[in-house]
Amino acid sequence: MSGLVGVIDEGTKTLSFSIYTIPDFKEIAAHVVELCLISPKDGWYEQDPREIMASINKCAEEAIKMLANQGFSANDIATVGITNQRETTVVWDAVTGKPLYNALLWKDIRTSTTVEKIVAKVQDPNHFRSSTGLPISTYFSALKIRWLRDNVPEVRKAMKEGRCKAGTVDSWIVWNLTNGALHVTDVTNASRTLLMNLETQNWDPELLQTFEIPEEMLPSIHSCSEVFGKITMDRSPLRGMMLSGIIGNQQASLLGQMCVNPGQTKNTYRSGCFILCNTGPQAPTIYAIEGAVLVAGHALSWLQSKMRILPDVKDAKRFAEEVPTSGEVYFVPAFTGLYAPYWQPNARGIIIGLTQFTRKNHIVRAALESICFQTLDILECMRQECGYKIRKLHADGKLSTNDLLMQIQADTIGMPVFRSQFVDFTSFGAAMCAAHADGLDLWRFDPEKDYAHVKYDTFQSTTMEDERKERYRKWKRAVKRSFGWVINQEETKMHEDDEGNNARLPSLPVNIFFIGSFAMLVHAISQSHSHRV
């Protein structure tokens, strides 16, 4: 059956609405707007939930206008899917439908003291790893909901009166699009909350009790690809259309890259990096390990806007190419701590190895190398955990257009990097989820078929193993020196590195990707040995 599928793609910086044809998944219309990022304090990041909904309406309206030139109309859109930034949390009043506070973004670290309280209570930051695959970290939604309860009187009052709803951004969007008729999420988003049990794929009673979060305020958990219902929002240009897909952005990217076989691995290079490796099926679910790098392209933005070393992020390649190496300079961009695989919230950024001969070009090159070393950190964990040999790395994302970065990446990991000429697979993956839903009879997924028809640029490694090992050993030394800089999370006081401090052991978080008969569970495994990275 032919038709069109629309995709709402809500990201950290932008929101878009794209329209694809079925069954060839050609994008024929799209409109993008930037989202306002609110940062009331250092390390605090928020968005206005109302702006998100207004942006959806604007993007959908503009994209639909483009259909006439393609011989289509809004009536040809058979269904709509949603993909979104994960972990970001919204709380709202179920009676009025209004947000009770701004959305707390995934990279927001205001919950550091909340993390400390929970860890003190359970005595181990990996206490829930067996049930969730996640460490107790500022990253995940449970900590954000708990912080909102403890610090925002309006939220606390609404929870007490039973009229507070909470969820990741997908839940907020669906609630509004259906006029409050549906409070749902999918397993990929639910798995990033630190509240879902991976085995049951339901909210875990022990976790709810630990974080003191009533289950009634949370959405029901569903698969990524099923018919949820019709869009009924009065002022929406999507009114009357079916809603049939919800999937977190990085799982959508993994699917879009067609990494559906064990060992296939992708990295999305943006302000952060998100590496996912398919580890194979345990029917009917497929598992994969995930690791996130908080600061990737953001390090280059910092060199531009804060240090004035770079005129523009786009100049990073030119500046770095003016020197053959980083001159033994290492840059650990732990601006707000380190995520996978170290999970060191008290780490802070360092630039080490400076000499009188160091130039700004060396620092820029070291920043590019830091992205590649952080990726290697996670790939090393994946090699140890998944049991499959990772033979190549699929790359996408805006930052991947930097040829020098891709070559340094191949040289750092010692394997080929296949960079897609298609920068972003997120909307494409979500389009496949929405179209695949049972009951629509639109399209069936074939893992052997190349739906994207994407060409790749290949970057081969040019380094010797001994050279790679020596460089990586020095990177690990630099990382260790970044640990333990923050004594008091509230006042962010700095102190000298205590070399005797034992590092918290590496871990990778868990995610799920579940699509009816075609299912994917993105599972990130926590590490438990200090020699692992």
Image: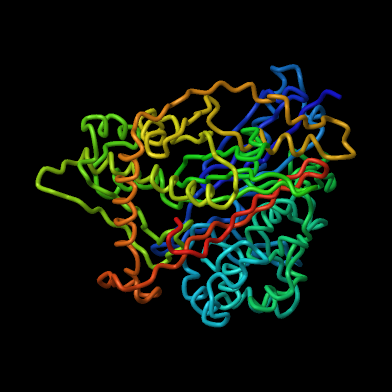
Question: For this rendering, which residue is in front, 290 or 279?
Answer: 279
| Residue drawn at (62%, 70%) of the image | 128
In which quadrant of the rendered view does residue 524 lie? bottom right
The residue positioned farthest toward the bottom in the image shown: 121
Q: Which percent across, then down, holds residue 431?
A: 71, 35
Q: Is residue 176 shown left or right of residue 402? A: right
Identify whether 359 is placed above or below 20. Answer: below
Q: Which percent across, then down, holds residue 261?
A: 67, 37
Identify whether 522 is placed above or below 190. Answer: above
Q: Is residue 514 shown left or right of residue 1? A: left
Color theme of the render: rainbow
Q: Is residue 411 shown left or right of residue 446? A: left
Q: Is residue 247 shown left or right of residue 77? A: left
Count of labels in the image:
0
| Residue drawn at (57%, 78%) of the image | 150
The residue positioned farthest toward the front in the image shown: 466
Quadrant in which the N terminus appears: top right
| Residue drawn at (48%, 56%) of the image | 340
The residue positioned farthest toward the left in the image shown: 356
Q: Which percent across, then down, holds residue 486?
A: 34, 71
Q: Which percent across, then down, holds residue 308?
A: 24, 44
Quadrant in which the C terminus appears: bottom left
Identify whether 95 is placed above or below 318. Answer: below
In which quadrant of the rendered view does residue 135 lie? bottom right
Question: For this rendering, which residue is in front, 11 or 458?
Answer: 458
